[in-house]
Amino acid sequence: MNTEFDILIVGGGLVGGSLALALDKTPLRVGLVEAQTDAERLASSAGDRALALSRGTVQSLSALGVWTGAALDAMAIRHIHVSDRGHFGKTRLHAADCGVDALGHVVVARMLENGIQAKLGETKVVRLCPVRTMGVKAGPERVHATLKQDQEQLHVSARLLVAADGGNSTVRTLLGVEQEARDYGQTAVVTEVTTTKDTHNTAYERFTPSGPLAFLPLERRKCSVVWTLNTEEAEDALRQGEGEFTARLQEAFGYWLGRIALATRPVGFPLRLIRAERMTDQRVVFIGNAMHQIHPVAGQGFNLGLRDAAILAERIALQVRLQQDIGDPEFLESYAEARRRDLERVVRFTDSLVRIFSNEFPPLVLARNLALTALDRLPMAKRFLSHQAMGYGS
């Protein structure tokens, strides 16, 4: 089988699927390579993870026509409560103060996946599924990919290949693009809990000496928990029985939501800042986790990846209207430069939060708590912080 496309997207997950939907509005012939069957995707535990979506991300998903369905199972974030465990500082953000109904939403990933896959079925996007990418080679005018479906080899080409195939990107490996990695020495312990008090649509970000602890509302009395601990503490916590673990988590979070009880088994994920050494190769561009993986504090990961897809789609559409080459090196570098600024901004923000709130040096503790208190009392500062939380900072 030999097939020619204008754009070939490798990776049909949330970011790659969203890009395919956005590009369906152009006259381009788009191919979408997916390694998993629909049955495998539905059975994967990855679909159970909770995503904190900024208001900007929700607007992007609405424009793609996938939010209406997902919204039925989403929980609006109308309040954000930020505190420093054991200290006086706290800041509270409210959607009503910004004149909006929600600062963001929490949704289970599978709901979004289902919406994207259903919408793709209504488009002219050509889905190649399930196939594995075996080789990638770029030429001056087209990039060629060798795919494998069962025992059959498929040879496809495109003017531009977009790698959206996740943190263990096959495309990145095949092209020999190295990664820069920095180990945080921390592990994200992820679980779900029930609470005896109503969440009242509040997302909690509580900073502890070991790292940030987030409670994201899933239901009135149920939350997704992301508890960042140093690696040794995380290993110890994960070895504990349910009662010991729950007591430890309760002590770290406090009783803002009453008593908590585990709803799912805790799982640990080592945390590293990972960035590909470059965002582009010859007629290839990397987006989402294929390009970057960041600290989960403030829930910026998926929002950042979706902005990759949205901005790339906008720029490709303009390039098409101007009748210019969508794989032109200067075009790809201009996109990379624009995204680099956003990526660096988010990395600086998340790194700063981790460093500042994991340090128990008394003058710094006092300074950060005074800052939190000041933020809570200064309307202009709160509006700025809310603006960032809604995903309008880039």
Image (spheres, rainbow, N blue to C red):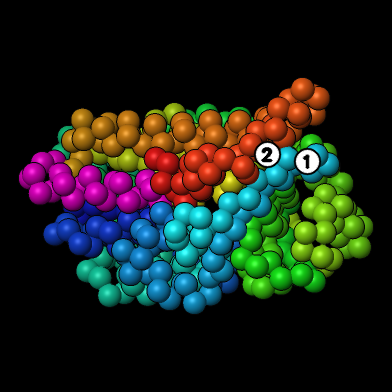
Quick check: 358 left or right of 282? right
Circle 2 SS class: helix
Residue at horizontal 41%, vertical 69%? 67
Q: Are marks 2 and 1 in contact (CB under 8 Å)?
A: yes
The span picked out in magenta is 306-325
Q: Main secondary structure of the magenta part?
A: helix
- Amino acid found under the numbered disc labelled 2: Thr
- Label 1 crowding class (10 Å Cα cut-off): few <14, some 14-19, many 20+? few
Quick check: 233 left or right of 214? right
Q: Which residue is mark 1?
A: 88
- Amino acid found under the numbered disc labelled 1: Phe
**Residue 37 locus on image (x, y percent):** 45, 69
User: Is residue 352 covered in magenta?
Assistant: no
Q: Quarter holding the N terminus? A: bottom left
Q: CA distance from mark 2 to mark 1?
A: 8 Å
* Figure quadrant of residue 31: bottom left
209 relative to 259, above or below: above
